[in-house]
Image (spheres, rainbow, N blue to C red):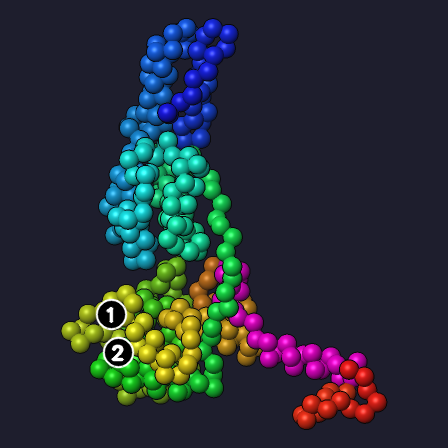
C-alpha cells in the first residue's frame, strides 16, 4: 500500500508520505472502496506535483539515468559501483517508485545483502543507494530523500604498512613479478614513493615531472587538485634512465593507459615472496602517509601532499607505530627513576617487579 486508511467516526481518512512530505486528509467517504479511490488519486497527484509534473521514476530507472548523465563525468570506481548495484543488488526495490522507498525497504534489502556479504560491503551498498537517491533530490525528482538508514558498526581491522627494512626486497620481488612490464614496476614505485592512487599512477605523465625542483604534480586526481609532491632521490634515480619528453610514464605496450586493478597481481606475488600480508595498492598510499608521519612531518604537510580536503581524512590513513610508544615509555620510566631490566631478563638487585 502507498497510503494508509483509517476512520474518524464514520468517515474514512488517508495518510501517506511522499519525498518526506506527510499528507493526511479526509476522503469524505463512508464506503471504503470509494475512499481507496480518493486516496489513490490524491497520492498520484502528490507524486506528480512533487516531481514537477513528471512521474517519479522507479529505482531501476533512476540508476540507469544516473549512469547515463553522471557516468561520463564520474570516477571509474563510482561508475563500477552503481553499475554493479543496478545489475545485481537492487533486490525487491528495483520496480518501486523512488518516492515510495522507506527506511524499512532499505533495511530489508540490506539484510538480504548481508546474508552473503560482510557488514563493510553492506555499508558500501548503502553509500551507493544514498549517492543515487541524493542525485534524484538534486535533479528535482524528489523534495528530499524519503529514508534515512544509519551505517552498520563494523569491527576495525589492523591495516598493514610496507616496512622499510623489507621495502627493497619487496620492490625487487615486484620487478620479478612484473618482469614483462617495466611500466607496472614504475607505477608501483609511484604509489609507494609519492603516495599516488592506483588510477593516478596509471595516468602519470612525463611532462608533469619538474626535474629541476624534483617534484611531481599529478594532473588527473580524484579531487581535481594539482599539488606538487617532492620526489625522493631514489625515485629520481630510477626514472632518469627512462626519461622522456612527454607521454604516459606507465603505459602498456600499445601505448594505452593501464586498466583498473593492473597492480594487484604483482603486489600479491611480492607479498607472498616477502611474507608481507595485507599490502594493496591503496595500502602503499597509507604506507607513504604513515612513514612521513613517523619521520616527523606535520599532519598539515601530509594532508597537502596527499591532496585531502580535511585533516581527519589524512588521520585515517596513519597507522600507529608502537615502537615509538615503547621508546616513550622507556624515557618516562627513566625519568621516574626505574632501572630498566637487563637484556638477560633478570631483575636488578633490590628492585621489585
Residue drawn at 41 percent across, 6 percent down: 30
- Determine whether label 2 and label 1 are within 8 Å by CB: yes
Badge 1 element: loop
Q: Position of residue 129 (x, y in %)?
A: 37, 45
Q: Earlier in the sequence, mark 2 or mark 1?
A: 2
Q: Quadrant of the C terminus?
A: bottom right
Relative vertical location of residue 151 with respect to residue 285 in this rendering, above or below:
above
Query: Foreground residue, 21 or 2?
Result: 2
For this rendering, which residue is in front, 331 or 87?
A: 87
Q: Secondary structure at mark 2?
A: helix
The segment highlighted magenta reads 310-338
Label 2 crowd (10 A; few <14 / some 14-19 / many >=20): many
In the displayed structure image, the side of residue 255 where residue 45 appears, left or right: right
User: To which residue does mark 1 refer?
Assistant: 258
Q: Which residue is mark 2?
A: 183
Identify which residue is drawn at 40% across, 76% down.
192
User: What secondary structure do most residues of the magenta stretch adopt?
Assistant: helix
331 is within the stretch colored magenta = yes
14 magenta-colored: no
Q: Nearer the viewer, residue 170 or 237?
A: 170
The residues tagged by marks 2 and 1 sit, at their Cα atoms, a distance apart of: 9 Å
Q: Position of residue 270 (x, y in %)?
A: 35, 80
* Mark 1 crowd level (few <14, some 14–19, many ≥20, 10 Å Cα): many
Amino acid at each position: 500500500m502507498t497510503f494508509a486508511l483509517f476512520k474518524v467516526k464514520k468517515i474514512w481518512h488517508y495518510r501517506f508520505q511522499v519525498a518526506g512530505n506527510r499528507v493526511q486528509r479526509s476522503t469524505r467517504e463512508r464506503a471504503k472502496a470509494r475512499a481507496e479511490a480518493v486516496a489513490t488519486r490524491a497520492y498520484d497527484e502528490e507524486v506528480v506535483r512533487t516531481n514537477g509534473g513528471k512521474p517519479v521514476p522507479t529505482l531501476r530507472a533512476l540508476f540507469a539515468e544516473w549512469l547515463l548523465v553522471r557516468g561520463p563525468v564520474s570516477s571509474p570506481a563510482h561508475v563500477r559501483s552503481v553499475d554493479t548495484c543496478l545489475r545485481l543488488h537492487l533486490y525487491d526495490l528495483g520496480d518501486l517508485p523512488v518516492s515510495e522507498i522507506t527506511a524499512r525497504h532499505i533495511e530489508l534489502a540490506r539484510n538480504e545483502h548481508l546474508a552473503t556479504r560482510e557488514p563493510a560491503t553492506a555499508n558500501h551498498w548503502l553509500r551507493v543507494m544514498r549517492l543515487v537517491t541524493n542525485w534524484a533530490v538534486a535533479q528535482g525528482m524528489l523534495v528530499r530523500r524519503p529514508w534515512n538508514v544509519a551505517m552498520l558498526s563494523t569491527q576495525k581491522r589492523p591495516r598493514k604498512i610496507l616496512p622499510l627494512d623489507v621495502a627493497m626486497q619487496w620492490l625487487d620481488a615486484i620487478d620479478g613479478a612484473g618482469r614483462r612490464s617495466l611500466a607496472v614496476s614504475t607505477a608501483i614505485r609511484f604509489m609507494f614513493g609519492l603516495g599516488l592512487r592506483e588510477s593516478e599512477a596509471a595516468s602519470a605523465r612525463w611532462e608533469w615531472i619538474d626535474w629541476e625542483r624534483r617534484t611531481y604534480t599529478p594532473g588527473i586526481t580524484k579531487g581535481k587538485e594539482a599539488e606538487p609532491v617532492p620526489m625522493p632521490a631514489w625515485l629520481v634515480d630510477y626514472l632518469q634512465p627512462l626519461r622522456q619528453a612527454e607521454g604516459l610514464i606507465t603505459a602498456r605496450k600499445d601505448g594505452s593507459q593501464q586498466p583498473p586493478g593492473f597492480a594487484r597481481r604483482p603486489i600479491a606475488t611480492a607479498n607472498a615472496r616477502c611474507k608481507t600480508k595485507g599490502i594493496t595498492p591503496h595500502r602503499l598510499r597509507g604506507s607513504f602517509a604513515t612513514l612521513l608521519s613517523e619521520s616527523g612531518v606535520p599532519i598539515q604537510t601530509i594532508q597537502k601532499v596527499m591532496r585531502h580536503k580535511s585533516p581527519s581524512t589524512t588521520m585515517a590513513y596513519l597507522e600507529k607505530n608502537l615502537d615509538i610508544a615503547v621508546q616513550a615509555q622507556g624515557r618516562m620510566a627513566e625519568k621516574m627513576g626505574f632501572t630498566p631490566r637487563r637484556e638477560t631478563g633478570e631483575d636488578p638487585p633490590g628492585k621489585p617487579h
